[in-house]
Amino acid sequence: MPSAMFDNVAIVGATGAVGREFIRLIEERGLRAKRFTLLASTRSMGTTVDVNGHPHEVRDLADASFEGIDIAFFSAGGGRSREFAPKAAAAGAVVIDNSSAFRMDPTVPLVVPEINPDDARNHQGIIANPNCSTIIMAVPVFPLHRVNRLRRIVVSTYQAASGAGLSAMQELEEQSRDVLAGKPPKPRAFPFPIAFNLFSHNSTIGDHGYNEEEIKMVRETRKIFHEPELAVTATCIRVPVMRAHSESINLTFADPMTPEAVREILSDAPGVRVVDERRPQHFPMPIEADGADDILVGRIRQDISQPDGCGIDLFVAGDQLRKGAALNGIQIAELLAKA
């Protein structure tokens, strides 16, 4: 199991869904520090959280000093990242930010360790973690792109409640109970009922008709792949799943690509597990991706609408809180520890 050692590690947003996953993965992967500093909003101040078997009191982010912090994992929303991440970096910390605040900043590397690890070493104090949907797509798609250059990606997502935070996960559970009891569901975290329903991702829609989540997938994929002209289009949907996202991906390559070649490439790709059993129809499912580090990939088949043989269809599933968020951040820290 990979391990890393730092003097002082801060977790900003320590009581949220991703913050809790950061703590769980710190313990699982043996990331050690002489001191852990847990920070959150005022309403979480004074909460006690165990890290590596030792209790730590959560402090108010607004009053925090980042002096002496080596690594600061930020997962408290874009507004807090924009306000506090530059302060942390100025104090000497390396910020690994899970929000969208700095992802498209040309001076900030946007890193998926299986794809562009060298970018992480060229930081100026802040490293951005990509959007969860982007990561879950990019990890299995990039190894194929490296072998046979991609011309186009068409992706449709089926995104779990966890992407909207702990309150949204609780809402899915509560609404499911209410519906089964014959009571009307009451949306709070989401604009519409999530139990036994699905709806377009609830981020702002621009004049072009794409919502923010879809545009993130387009722009972030291009940046991570170092392919500014790559054709990418996305449709992002919320579904009543607790915490693992799934995605249907259609790929167009420069040259013909067979399903057999795809399986061979992905069988050796880091962070990927092929689940593609046609006879029992065992393919990626969010229930099996939940809690897993790897992205599950299956439904690998030739796109029959592309007669030149350059099209491939995939279906993937990945844990949004792990590889889609906290695990990717921990892996970035592990890269820095080796540098």
Image (spheres, grey):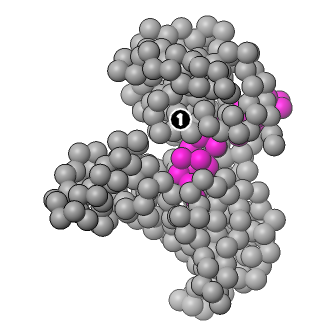
Relative to 27, say whether 229 is above or below.
Answer: below
Magenta span of residues:
318-339
Question: Is the magenta region chiefly helix, strand or loop?
Answer: helix
**Residue 77 coordinates in the image, percent (x, y):** 42, 33
Question: Neighbour class for label 1 at 10 Å: few (<14), some, many (≥20)?
Answer: many
Q: Quick one: 16 or 134, which is closer to the camera?
A: 16
**Residue 300 coordinates in the image, percent (x, y):** 64, 79
In screen coordinates, is 20 left or right of 92? left
Does the stretch in magenta take in 4? no
**Residue 57 coordinates in the image, percent (x, y):** 52, 16
Q: Can residue 134 be seen from the camera position used here?
A: no
Does the stretch in magenta take in 330? yes
Q: Quick one: 190 or 256, which is closer to the camera?
A: 190
What residue is at 51 percent from the left and 28 percent from the top?
14
Q: What residue is pinned by disc 1? A: 20
Relative to 11, say whether 284 is above or below.
Answer: below
In screen coordinates, is 202 left or right of 56? left
